[in-house]
């Protein structure tokens, strides 16, 4: 991006103040801020680490605990409110609201678990965790959606890397938790209350919709972020293995946490490097007269011809927009545009494509999320030690990350080179997740380790695919709302498969075991189940539901195969060409790095001679 800023004038070297302004107002610091926000926005995936503490402290049975888990999923995924807020407010406001909600929700839970307040009613705890988890949708909407709108032509890559950091957040926060508080699950609740809130507030002025002028090698810069994140994931994997083999002391945890923090801030080096290149190019254009060119006016005979082809198109578009604005949205709800065009919110919600995608997500994400939320209880019931259960959570977090970045980057490559439709890749991911469910159902020896890897990978891979499909089929105009609507499928699937299936069947088996032993259950006593039968039937049902979702997803792949075989990014290149023609007609004269405009409602620079409002123009009449 080329950002207007003061130079030193007089042809000398620009001062460092202009470089600082370049960094602070450039697009790459915005990406870095989004990465940090996402690295702390996945606290909801750590529920299994502190759920046992809630269960024992408040005397809940498994059904009640799974109800709490459902409201956690409901809060984190029902982000329609966040989407609607984002339609009418800037990202900084969305992030600020998210920070307040995050701190309030988890702080109240911490007060309840530590008995600093009277024991709350179950619905109070459901409300607290729902509010705290709902902050995640505000963080996603405020930062992730903003980045997608700023970088629309590589949205798969953007979604993959940002969602990847969300996947790593569980392992990241776990390392920080052990460094700050040792092994105190109650303090973990406090940590996930204040840490994400602080990070969001630090970047409220950085995350914004920008007049981004993209560099030609933009995707390579995101690959640098990817390599750093792979290094972070690899380090976390090594640390998890070492923690499993050795008992870490507090100083050792602090050392590993310091390395995690270093790797989290390492992308800042990429930010400074890339902004330096843009800063040098910009000031060279400002201070070196050599790039100044004399641009002659087009012959008068060409101007009317170009005007005759462009002006009617613009006026026609404006007329169509006015016509659509004057027609009730309800009247057009069942008259959707072509796939890839900007749907209204109602057109998207009543679309058959959205219904199919929604149903597939309920089955796919709902099943994997049920496994993740119950990892603690699954490990305990199958006789795994406590340290192994912590390992499962970290494995899920890391492979969740790998699933997200793999799905984002690989699907973008396959789509660009081979026209491979994203819905078909979603279908294959859901089919693969069935293997993990079956490993849990039949308690294969040491199978929970493999199941954690498979389920973590598949859970992570589904999200960037889901959000990319929504943006490609329904457009970016109302993406803030539609993005969050797509997430609603997750808590619905979680409620059906987690609360109604897994929770009830677990409690039924636990009561059967207590009755067989002749042990009566006391009021307020938690229910515990041991053995493979606790979750066997649940995960057989989940496998069947996921297979059904696989078939449904394949149906969407068939419906959209012609769309994905077409050039779905053609309209973005046409806008680039239109911007080039407009700037050529304006006679701009400054040669800057090759850039292209983003489709987020802003006009930007392009080509060798770009109009950016920061330098002199030379034109002869």
Image (tube, helix red, strand yellow):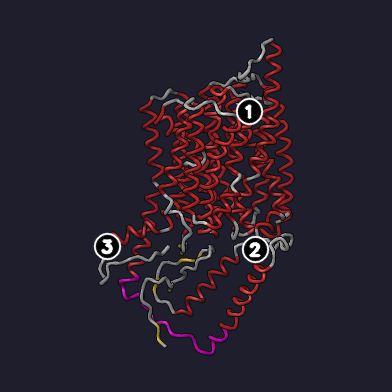
Please say whether residue 65 is visible from this viewpoint: yes
Q: Please check the rendered image and state whether residue 304 is part of the magenta-colored stretch, yes or no.
A: yes
Q: Residue placed at 60% from the left, 81% from the top?
A: 309
Query: First in sequence: mark 3 or mark 1?
Result: 3
Asked if labels 1 and 3 touch by Cβ distance under 8 angstroms, the answer is: no
Q: CA distance from mark 2 to mark 3?
A: 45 Å
Near mark 3 (Cα within 10 A), the count class, few <14, some 14-19 or many ≥20, is few
Give the left or right position of residue 548, taking residue 158 as reference.
right
Residue 340 image position (x, y, % from top left)? 65, 61
Using the image as rendered, state which of residue 170 and residue 106 is in the foreground.
106
Using the image as rendered, state which of residue 291 and residue 199 is in the foreground.
199
Relative to 603, residue 398 above or below:
above
Label at residue 196: none
Q: Residue placed at 50% from the left, 66% from the top?
A: 602
Q: Residue placed at 44% from the left, 28% from the top?
A: 242
Please say whether residue 458 is visible from this viewpoint: no
Depth check, mark 2 against mark 1: the one in front is 1
Using the image as rendered, state which of residue 461 and residue 489 is in the foreground.
489
Query: First in sequence: mark 2 or mark 1?
Result: 1
Asked if labels 3 and 2 touch by Cβ distance under 8 angstroms, the answer is: no
Query: First in sequence: mark 2 or mark 3?
Result: 3
Q: CA distance from mark 2 to mark 1?
A: 44 Å
Find numbered disc 2 in the image and state the secondary structure of the residue it sits on: loop
Label at residue 341: 2
Q: Which residues are magenta?
A: 285-305
Label at residue 64: 1
Residue 538 image position (x, y, % from top left)? 70, 29
Label at residue 15: 3
Near mark 1 (Cα within 10 A), the count class, few <14, some 14-19 or many ≥20, is some
Asked if labels 1 and 2 touch by Cβ distance under 8 angstroms, the answer is: no
């Amino acid at each position: 991006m080329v950002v207007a800023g003061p130079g030193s004038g007089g042809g000398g070297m620009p001062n460092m103040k202009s470089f600082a302004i370049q960094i602070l107002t450039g697009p790459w610091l915005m990406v870095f801020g989004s990465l940090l926000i996402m690295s702390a926005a996945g606290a909801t995936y750590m529920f299994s680490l502190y759920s046992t503490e809630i269960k024992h402290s408040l005397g809940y049975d498994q059904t009640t605990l799974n109800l709490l888990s459902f409201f956690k999923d409901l809060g984190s995924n029902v982000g329609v409110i966040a989407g609607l807020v984002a339609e009418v407010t800037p990202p900084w406001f969305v992030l600020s609201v998210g920070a307040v909600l995050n701190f309030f929700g988890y702080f109240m839970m911490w007060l309840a678990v530590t008995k600093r307040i009277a024991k709350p009613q179950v619905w109070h705890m459901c409300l607290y965790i729902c509010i705290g988890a709902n902050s995640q949708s505000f963080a996603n909407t405020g930062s992730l959606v903003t980045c997608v709108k700023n970088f629309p032509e590589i949205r798969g890559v953007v979604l993959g890397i940002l969602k990847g950091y969300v996947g790593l957040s569980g392992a990241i926060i776990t390392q920080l938790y052990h460094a700050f508080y040792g092994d105190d699950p109650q303090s973990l609740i406090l940590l996930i209350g204040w840490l994400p809130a602080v990070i969001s507030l630090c970047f409220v002025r950085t995350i914004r919709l920008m007049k981004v002028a993209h560099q030609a090698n933009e995707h390579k810069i995101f690959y640098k972020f990817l390599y750093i994140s792979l290094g972070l994931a690899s380090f976390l994997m090594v640390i998890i293995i070492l923690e499993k083999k050795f008992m870490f002391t507090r100083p050792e945890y602090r050392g590993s946490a310091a390395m995690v923090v270093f790797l989290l801030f390492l992308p800042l080096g990429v930010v400074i490097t890339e902004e330096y290149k843009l800063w040098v190019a910009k000031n060279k254009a400002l201070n070196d007269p050599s790039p100044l060119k004399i641009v002659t006016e087009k012959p008068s005979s060409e101007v009317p011809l170009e005007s005759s082809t462009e002006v009617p198109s613009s006026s026609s578009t404006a007329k169509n927009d006015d016509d659509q604005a004057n027609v009730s949205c309800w009247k057009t709800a069942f008259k959707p545009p072509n796939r890839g065009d900007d749907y209204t919110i109602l057109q998207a919600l009543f679309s058959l494509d959205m219904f199919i995608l929604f149903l597939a997500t309920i089955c796919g994400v709902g099943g994997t999320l049920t496994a993740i939320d119950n990892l603690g209880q699954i490990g305990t019931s199958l006789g795994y030690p406590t340290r192994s259960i912590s390992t499962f959570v970290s494995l899920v977090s890391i492979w969740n990350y790998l699933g997200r970045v793999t799905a984002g980057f690989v699907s973008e490559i396959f789509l660009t080179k081979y026209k491979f439709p994203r819905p078909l890749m979603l279908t294959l991911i859901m089919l693969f997740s069935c293997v993990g469910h079956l490993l849990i159902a039949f308690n294969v020896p040491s199978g929970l380790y493999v199941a954690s890897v498979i389920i973590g990978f598949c859970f992570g891979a589904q999200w960037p695919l889901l959000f990319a499909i929504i943006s490609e089929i329904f457009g970016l105009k109302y993406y803030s709302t539609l993005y969050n609507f797509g997430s609603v499928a997750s808590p619905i699937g979680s409620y059906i498969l987690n609360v109604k299936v897994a929770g009830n069947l677990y409690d039924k088996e636990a009561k059967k075991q207590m009755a067989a032993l002749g042990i009566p259950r006391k009021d307020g006593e938690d229910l515990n189940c041991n053995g493979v039968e606790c979750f066997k039937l649940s995960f057989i049902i989940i496998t069947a539901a996921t297979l059904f979702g696989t078939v449904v997803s394949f149906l969407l792949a068939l419906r959209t195969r012609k769309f994905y075989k077409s050039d779905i990014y053609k309209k973005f290149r046409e806008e680039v060409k239109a911007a080039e023609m407009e700037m050529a007609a304006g006679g701009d004269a400054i040669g800057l790095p090759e850039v292209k405009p983003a489709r987020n409602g802003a006009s930007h620079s392009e080509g060798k001679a770009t109009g950016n409002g920061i330098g002199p123009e030379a034109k002869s009449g």
